[in-house]
Amino acid sequence: MSRLEYLARPLVAFDASNKAHRRYYWEFMKYRGWGKCPVRFICTEEHGDNLPSMIQRMMVEYYVNKEFEPVVKEQRSSKLGNIVKKLAAQKTKKTVDKRTKR
C-alpha cells in the first residue's frame, strides 16, 4: 500500500443534511477550488465528472424539502384539529335530571 493513500483526504459521499458538507461546498464556491476541503467527495456515475453540479442538485432538493415539509405537517395537524372539532360538535349534550334538594 502506498504512503499517499494514508496521506490523502478521505473519500466521502456528499450529504446535504450534513452542515459540514454544506460548508465545504460554500468554501468551494468562495475559493473556486477544493484545496481547503479536508475530504474528497464521491461523484456518482449518473452525474459523470461534474461534482459541483451534483452537489448543487442535492442542495436544491434538500432546501426545497426543508422549506415545504413543515407546511404538509401543519396541514395534517389542522385537518386533524378540524375533524376533532366536528366530532365534538356532533356529540349531543346529555341532560341530567336534577333532583330537588330536601
Image (cartoon, grey):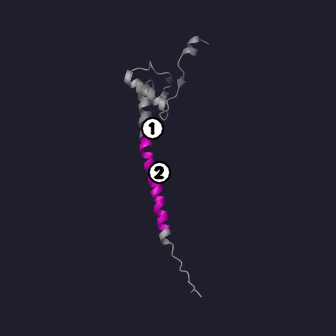
Query: Magenta part of the protein: which range?
Result: 64-87
Q: Residue at x 49, y 59 (%)?
A: 80
Residue 34 sits in which quadrant? top left
- Residue in front for this viewpoint, 96 or 49: 96
Residue in front for this viewpoint, 91 or 53: 91
Query: What label sits on residue 100 in the rendered view?
Result: none
- Report crowding for label 1: few under 14, some 14 to 19, many 20 or more residues within 10 A (C-alpha): some
Q: Mark 1: which secondary structure? A: helix
Q: Determine the main secondary structure of the stretch shown in magenta.
A: helix
Instruction: Name which residue lies at 43% across and 34% down.
Output: 59
Instruction: Please determine whether, in this image, residue 51 is positioned above or below residue 7.
Output: below
Indicate yes or no whether the magenta region holds residue 65. Answer: yes
Q: Is 34 drawn above or below residue 3 in the view shown?
A: below
According to the picture, the residue beneath numbered tag 1 turns out to be 62
Helix, strand or loop at disc 2?
A: helix
Residue 55's spot in the image, x, y percent? Answer: 44, 30
The residue that appears at 52% across and 28% down in the rendered structure is: 13
- Amino acid under disc 1: Tyr
Please state, as top left, top right, bottom left or bottom right, where the N terminus lies in the image.
top right
- The answer to whether residue 46 is visible is no
State the CA–CA distance, disc 1 to disc 2.
Answer: 17 Å
Q: Residue 86, percent across and down?
A: 47, 67
Can I make out residue 20 in this image?
Answer: yes
Query: Which residue is located at x 38 percent, y 25 percent?
Result: 29
Residue located beneath label 2 in the image? 73
Question: In the orientation shown, which residue stands out farthest toward the top?
Answer: 3
Residue 5 coordinates in the image, percent (x, y): 57, 15
